Structure formats: C-alpha cells, structure tokens
C-alpha cells in the first residue's frame, strides 16, 4: 500500500492559509531591497553578504514553520500501521449471490445452487449462537437487507425467500456485494468482523479482486464459499429467452484469492494466515472451517480477543515537531554570525550539533507518557478504537509495577465503559491493586468511582454507595463521588420505603378481614341470645299483650 494512497486531510480549509505566504513574502522582499540599498549606500560591503544570507535563511525557515503548522492543524494523515485492538464478540456478514446462474441444477443434485445455499446457511445459523450477523444481496448491485442483529428468525425468513427476483438490477457483481458488506460495518465496531460470500463465482463486471483487496487492507477476513459443479449447466437468462451455460468458477476464484493474499501479505491478519480464502461447499468439514474462524470455535461471540487493524497514521505531532525546529532555526539564522564559520572551533561545534540533531531525529521514539496523552485525547474525541490501541500498547510494553501500566489499564477500563462493554471494563479494573496505598490518590479514587458507576448501571446501589465511599476516602476532594453517594443513598432509602409500604399493604389486607370476624361473632352471640329468650318464652305463660323480643 503506497503512502499517497492513504493520504487524507480532515480539515482541508486550513490549507487555504497557504496563500497568506504570498503577501508576507512580497512585504519581506520589498523590505529586504530597502535594507540592502541602505547597506550599500553606507559602503558597508563587508556585512552585506552576511546579512543577505541571514535574512534569506530566516525567511526560509519561518516559511517552512508556517507550512508545517498548517499541515499539523489540517490533521493530515498518510501511511498506515497495524495497531492492536480489543475485540469483544463477533459479527458475520452473509453475502448471497442471487444472480440467475444460481438457479442452475447441477447433476446429479435435485436442488439448485440457491437451494443448496439456503440449506447450508441455515445449518450455519444454528451454530452461531451469541454471534450477531447481517445479510447482503449481490446481483448486478449490492444491497444490505438485514443490518447487524442477533435475530435468527429474520435471517431464516430471508433464506426461505432468496430469489433473483428480489433485485431488479441485471448481471452479477460479487464485488459490489462485498463493498456493500464493507460499507455496512461500523468504523469503530467493538466486534470482530467476518464476511462469508456464497456464490458460484460467475460475475459480469470483474470487480471481485479489487473489492477483496479493499477488505484485506481493512483487515476484514473474507471467505468465499463455492456452490455448484465445474461442469457446465444450461440455464435461462434473466430475459426469459436466452439460454446460457454456467459452472462453478472455482479455479478463477482460487487465483483471485491467491493474488489478493500476495498483495496484502504485509498486512496479514493476526491469527489468520490469509485474509481471503476460498472453500468448496462440498469439501469435507467446509462448515467447520467457517465456524473455526470465530473465536471460541462454535460461535461463542462473547469471548474477548486481541486483534489488529490497519489505521492511517496521523502526522499532527510530526509537523508540530518540525514547526518548532524551523522556528528555532530561524532565530539561530538571525543571530548567528556566519563570518565566524571560518573559525575551526565553531565549525567543529556546528558539526557536532548537526550530528546530535540527526541522531535525535533518527533515534527518538514515542514515550509511554506521550502515548497515554495521545490515547486520552483520542478518547476525548470519541475515537475509542485508536484510544484502545494506544492504551493496549502501553499496557503491553510497560513494566508490571510501573505507573504507566496502571494508568494504561485504568484508561482501557474507562474506554470499554464508554463503549458499553461493562464486563471488559470490570475485568480491567480488577487487574489494579486498589488496596495498595502506594498507588496515586487520583488513580485510586477514579477507579473506585468507575466501579461505582458500573454498579449503578447494574442497579446495584448498595455496591455503588460502598465504592463511592471508598472513592471519597481515597480523595476527599472528589466532589462528584460525594454527590453520587448522596443520590445512591436516596435511591436506597426510596427502595426501602417502597418495600416497607408493600409490607404495610399486606398488614392492612389482614386487618380488613378482622371486622368481618367480629361481625360474625356478634351475630352468633345475638342469635344465641335470641334462641335463649325464645326458649324462656316457650317455657312460661304466653302474654299476647307483651311484644315478643
């Protein structure tokens, strides 16, 4: 991959400031002419050439400093590098070739190639539990029909209805199908991405190789699964009149994948010998070869892994460095007495300084602190993938007991938390020995604070309150922890009040039955008293003039 092919500028409008150099240089030229005339009139010819050289070098270095500063501000990027990226889970993009050649029935099979794809892909789906997937249709064009999802029923519904009539575009373009799959993948996805193409290899626009090269340079593995027989079969074309012959173009696809792998060998994917592979669907254990690409073999997409991605190299720091160097040289050129170069001692000193500068430029490397700062800035800008790469690099290179490693681990945890990966964030925090009081107070309080936030996300307010308290003990100036502790205690109090209210409601229900029991007892007593009075009245003389109670 050439450097120029990866050139990109995020803020191109900044480069318009280049034109400000023209009036500035014109002004300096006029001033220089007046200055040289003044020296010539004073007949100070001895210093004229020295001043000319000094002014020329000062102008040159300051112009270069201005250009370097503009390039730095424009966020120019060129070149590429392979960076480590934490991946949690996996996503498989199914690319289905639904061109008319897939309707061919190759003897002795009773099924068409498209029917074989339906059965094959359906069996793969049954073994992709906990793995997300998406679907792309490829015919004369590529179209994403199912975005990333874990709903297997939607994919099964699509498989049952696969047909060339789903797309009106004519021809067969596998390359456009792969490009549609690449475009559907989020740039900062936290999942490992895989593309599986189900086809017979017949294409009409010869774009397959270029699309595979793009996927290989993006570090996304593509596997082509071939269906059909290499013997020609006759089918009806899309117009319903023309008969054409088609076959599995296995040899052609093998040559393309070999060529792409040779071109992208410098960017080979970690864990895979090749970026692009061809598998015959009829080959033994072909489905197992597909499933084994995913971490955890049978699609255990929840496993985390360390993989690599190719990213453009941002040259912001590079041009800032040269801006400072050119500014320093401009001041040196302004004050330096070039007539003293004849002095051998000064010449030796200059030679040594040039050698030292060259050595510094060639040998200097990025420090751990600088990489941590770059990662923090990328995290602030929302570039979580690049931030993760910087923090992972420091965590792997730094000594076990160094502060840089502890800060890198904490920053990794914070980045995963921002990406919604709570389990990965909690795992990184568990690697820190927070009980060690030798750790800086700001690191300990921030770690306890993040542990509390994770507990809040899980609705565990008791654990969250405990960690907020520990954050305050680590640093009594942590105002946010104090505020959140108060909020957690309110939640706990409210929860306890709700539980108490629920218990009171249960007691009230029991109390509501008590009056009914009293009424029944009272009625029973009254009935017994009535019977007693009736028995007494029956035993004595009747007096019809007396009311019967």
Image: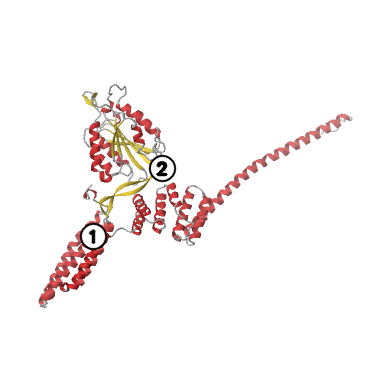
Question: Which label number is shown at residue 145?
Answer: none
Residue at 26% x, 64% y is 324
The image shows residue 470 at horizontal and vertical percentages of: 50, 57
Residue 68: mark in rendering: 1
Frontmost residue, 14 versus 128? 128
x then y, percent, for residue 493? 56, 51
Q: Viewer-proximal residue, 307 or 90?
A: 307
For the question of whether residue 487 can be seen, the reply is no
Relative horizontal placement of residue 259, taking residue 538 as reference (left or right): left
| Residue 404 seen anywhere in this rendered image of the structure | yes
Question: 19 or 370, which lies in front?
Answer: 370
Classify residue 6 as left or right of residue 152.
Answer: left
Furthest residue toward bottom: 42
Nearer the camera: disc 2 or disc 1: 2
| Above or below: residue 12 compared with residue 338 | above
Sequence order check, earlier mark of 2 and 1: 1
The colouring scheme, among rainbow, by chain, secondary structure or one colour, is secondary structure
Residue closest to the far right? 541
Q: Answer yes or no: do the residues labelled 2 and 1 have beta carbons within 8 Å?
A: no
* Residue 158, quarter of the rendered image: top left
Quadrant where the C terminus lies? top right
Badge 2: residue crowd in 10 Å (few <14, some 14–19, many ≥20): some
Q: In the rendered image, which quarter is residue 332 located in?
A: bottom left
Above or below 93: residue 322: below
**Horizontal and vertical percent for residue 74?**
26, 56
Q: Quadrant of residue 45?
A: bottom left
Q: Secondary structure at mark 1?
A: helix
Q: Secondary structure at mark 2?
A: loop
Q: CA distance from mark 2 to mark 1?
A: 44 Å
The residue tagged 2 is: 303
């Amino acid at each position: 991959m050439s450097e120029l092919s990866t050139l990109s500028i995020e803020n191109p409008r900044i480069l318009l400031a280049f034109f400000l150099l023209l009036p500035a240089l014109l002004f300096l030229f006029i001033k220089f002419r007046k200055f040289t005339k003044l020296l010539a009139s004073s007949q100070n010819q001895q210093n004229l050439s020295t001043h000319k050289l000094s002014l020329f070098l000062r102008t040159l270095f300051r112009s270069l400093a201005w250009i370097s500063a503009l390039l730095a501000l424009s966020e120019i990027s060129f070149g590429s590098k392979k960076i480590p990226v934490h991946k949690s889970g996996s996503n498989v993009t199914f690319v289905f070739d639904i061109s008319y050649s897939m309707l061919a029935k190759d003897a002795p099979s009773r099924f068409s190639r498209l029917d074989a794809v339906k059965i094959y892909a359906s069996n793969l789906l049954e073994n992709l539990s906990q793995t997300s997937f998406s679907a792309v249709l490829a015919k004369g064009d590529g179209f994403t029909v199912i975005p990333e999802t874990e709903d297997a029923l939607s994919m099964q519904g699509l498989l049952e209805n696969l047909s060339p009539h789903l797309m009106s575009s004519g021809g067969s373009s596998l390359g456009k199908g792969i490009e549609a799959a690449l475009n559907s993948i989020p740039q900062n996805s936290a999942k490992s991405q895989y593309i599986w193409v189900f086809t017979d290899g017949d294409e009409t626009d010869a774009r397959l190789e270029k699309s595979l090269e793009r996927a290989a340079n993006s570090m996304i593995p593509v596997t082509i699964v071939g269906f059909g027989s290499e013997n020609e079969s006759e089918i009806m074309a899309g117009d319903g009149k023309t008969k054409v012959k088609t076959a599995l173009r296995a040899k052609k696809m093998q040559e393309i994948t070999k060529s792409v792998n040779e071109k992208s060998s410098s960017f080979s994917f970690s864990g895979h010998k090749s970026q692009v592979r061809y598998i015959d669907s009829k080959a033994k254990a072909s489905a197992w070869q597909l499933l084994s690409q995913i971490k955890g073999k049978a699609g255990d997409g929840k496993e985390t892994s360390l993989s690599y991605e190719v990213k453009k190299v941002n040259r912001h720091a590079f041009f800032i460095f040269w801006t400072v160097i050119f500014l320093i040289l401009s001041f040196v050129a302004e004050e330096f007495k070039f007539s003293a170069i004849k002095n051998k001692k000064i010449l030796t000193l200059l030679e040594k300084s040039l050698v030292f500068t060259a050595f510094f430029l060639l040998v200097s490397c990025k420090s751990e602190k600088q990489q941590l700062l770059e990662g923090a800035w990328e995290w602030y800008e929302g570039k979580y993938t690049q931030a993760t790469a910087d923090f992972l690099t420091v965590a792997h290179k730094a000594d076990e007991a160094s502060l840089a490693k502890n800060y890198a681990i904490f920053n990794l945890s914070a980045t995963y938390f921002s990406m919604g990966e709570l389990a990965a964030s909690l795992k990184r925090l568990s690697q820190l020995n927070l009980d060690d009081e030798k750790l800086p107070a700001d690191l300990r309080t921030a770690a306890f604070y993040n542990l509390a936030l994770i507990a809040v996300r899980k609705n565990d307010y008791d654990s969250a309150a405990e960690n907020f308290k520990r954050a305050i003990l680590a640093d009594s100036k942590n105002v946010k922890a104090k505020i959140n502790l108060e909020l957690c205690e309110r939640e706990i109090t409210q929860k306890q009040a709700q539980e108490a209210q629920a218990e009171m409601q249960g007691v009230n229900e029991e109390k509501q039955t008590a009056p009914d029991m009293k009424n029944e007892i009272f009625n029973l007593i009254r009935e017994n008293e009535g019977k007693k009075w009736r028995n007494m009245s029956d035993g004595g003389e009747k007096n019809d003039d007396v009311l019967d109670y």
